[in-house]
Amino acid sequence: MSKLDTSQTRPMKESDFIEQNKEKWKHFEQNLVKKDATPQEVSKLFVQITDDLSYSRTFYNNRSVKLYLNGIAKLLFNDINKAKKNKWSVFASFWKKELPQVMYASRRPMLISFLVFWSCFILGVITSIYEPSFANTILGDSYIVMTNENIESGSPMHVYADDGEMETFLPILLNNLLVAFRTFFSGFFASIGSLVIMMYNGVMVGVFQFFFVEKEVLTEMMANDGAIRGFFHYFFFDDNLFRKSFLSIWTHGTLEISAIIIAGGAGITLGKGLLFPKTYSRLQAFKMSARNGLKIIMGISPVIFLAAFIEGFLTRHTDIPNILRLSFILLSLAFIIVYFVWYPRWVAKKTAFVEDSLDVAPVYVKKNPFNPNKILSIAELFSESLRVYFKSLGFYLTFVLPCSLLFAIIVATDEIGLFFEADYYYVSYTIADYFNYSALPAVAIISGLFFLFFFVFSTLFTKLKLTAPEEKFSIKNTSFSYSALSFFLCTPVFVGLIAIGNGWFVFLAFLLLPLLILMSSVSSNENINFFAAAGKTSSLLNNNWFKFIALSLLISALLSLFFFSINAIFDSLIVKTGIIWSLTDDDEIANSLSLGFSAFLISFSFLSYLILMSASSCVLYYTLKETHTAKDLLVRIKNITAKE
């Protein structure tokens, strides 16, 4: 086909343009999928497709055909240049080009996150001015008492030197990473979750900073010939509590708070795909927004690490000259502004159609059915496990939701005293309560039966969907007896270790759980008894322990992030803001509702974890089997020999 004339004054209709070129584009897709074109052919295809893309940008700039062609052009370009890239160039490209592009494309969500945080910071300060007790509500009575004692002793920032450097650094790092990821994943709820977390953090930081100011600011300001002159003198000349707190807090806080604000912007970016899909399907838009948000989170992870390191090793040294600490704060601020604000804008000006290149739906490739003879990588195992889980999510929820709701009702009412002592007033229900079997052994037995049911049904259902996806689930067509007996032997081990009550035994129970599930999965798939499956599992895991451990950690991390994100939103929206208490005047009913909500979230999250872990074990089984036996490889070699 001849090159399109983009100089014509009257363009053809979009439908005619598509009709004229659809066969050519179909040929392009086939080359992309099969990857059998020579480099010369790929380069020729790239020239032709960019011609069509140029035409579509000129005459159909806001239509989906432009986005489609842009996607093909990008994939072709990557195919041409992939041989030139190595892992270091990809790593450098992420920081030099990819992350700045994503930051620029997400500039509006970042601005929203910035404005929400600092508006709530100001709100926290103003509220503290008019209601001094507000600090106790936000920071807690114990923290206020401790800080007042430190101020009176002449070491207001002693909180940063209570423990050793490493003992301070590691918990802060883990906490800040958790806050960042929780803020990001909360954006799944139409960005509202991320906004709520930003609001709460803004108010908390404002209250925290003003707490040190209110101790002396009013008297100091008015003692220096009027409020305005006193304000200037206090903030710039006096060696006072505010200066000490400001230099200590913001030595690490400049990077830490900036990273949290950026994480909030990443969360809003995540929700943006669901709210505003533009010309894409809502699922496509969500995938793209999630991908961009994850890149941002990856980009701020080193910043969070550096902030935690500074807080653990540097902030405690308040004897460092003030000018050096102030210079460090300004240097940190300059880095944030230059790399995360100015540099993305500069890269965007040098890159044509930067947002188009980010918001590109991949060329459609039909999903092949699960191949039990293929050896999957860790990423593929994780992806396939999620695919199996979400493909049958509706079926799983028909069991998880009613069970979790029933459990929540039992906890909220607790008429028979299964979970709480009658003479003690409980204000929260936590994961520790969910696995507390020390009071009544009956709770351990009931929990074990519930877990046993979910183990067996999810394993059998996943096995069926992997091997015969079109068949309807029926116990008659499954290896029910082997699965039930295997999990019947495994479940008491898991529940029994928890029932002992010792922290190390609880840790051991959760450490062994993925292995127990895998052994039972092997029993179900091989149709052998549990003890034979234990030996078989040992053989299958030989030289494959890393895959098993990595997959188990990924599944655990995913569900942990989900739970803590949901729980944070629940805690902020339902408990801290008192929505439950606004629904009723009866404190007992309000407390029961709060306990019920917490119990539902914990039960839903853990039962979902059991199902996903069982599904991933079934997926992993086939990879381990092929790795161990090489059955498919031997068949293919035999066929080649036969043909010769």
Image: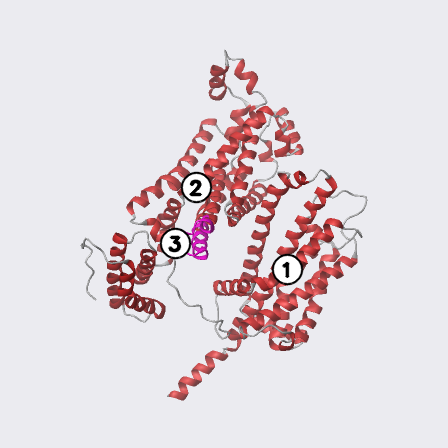
Task: Kindly identify the amino acid type of the residue bearing the numbered disc 3.
Answer: Thr
Reply yes or no: does residue 283 show up in magenta.
yes
Instruction: Identify whether 236 is placed above or below 34.
Output: above
Label 1 crowd bin: few (<14), some (14–19), many (20+), radius 10 Å: some
Q: Nearer the viewer, mark 2 or mark 3?
A: 3
Q: Is residue 123 left or right of residue 39?
A: right
Reply yes or no: does residue 129 show up in magenta.
no
Instruction: Identify whether 145 is placed above or below 525.
Output: above
**Magenta range:** 272-293
Secondary structure character of the magenta stretch overall: helix
Tell me, for residue 400, which label it has, or none: 1
* Local SS, label 1: helix
Q: Residue at x 64, y 70 (%)?
A: 520
Label 3 crowd bin: few (<14), some (14–19), many (20+), radius 10 Å: few
Task: Kindly identify the amino acid type of the residue bearing the numbered disc 2.
Answer: Met
Q: Which residue is mark 3?
A: 279
Q: Which residue is mark 2?
A: 110
Q: Is residue 389 left or right of residue 40?
A: right
User: Can you say which quadrant of the picture contains the N terminus?
Assistant: bottom left
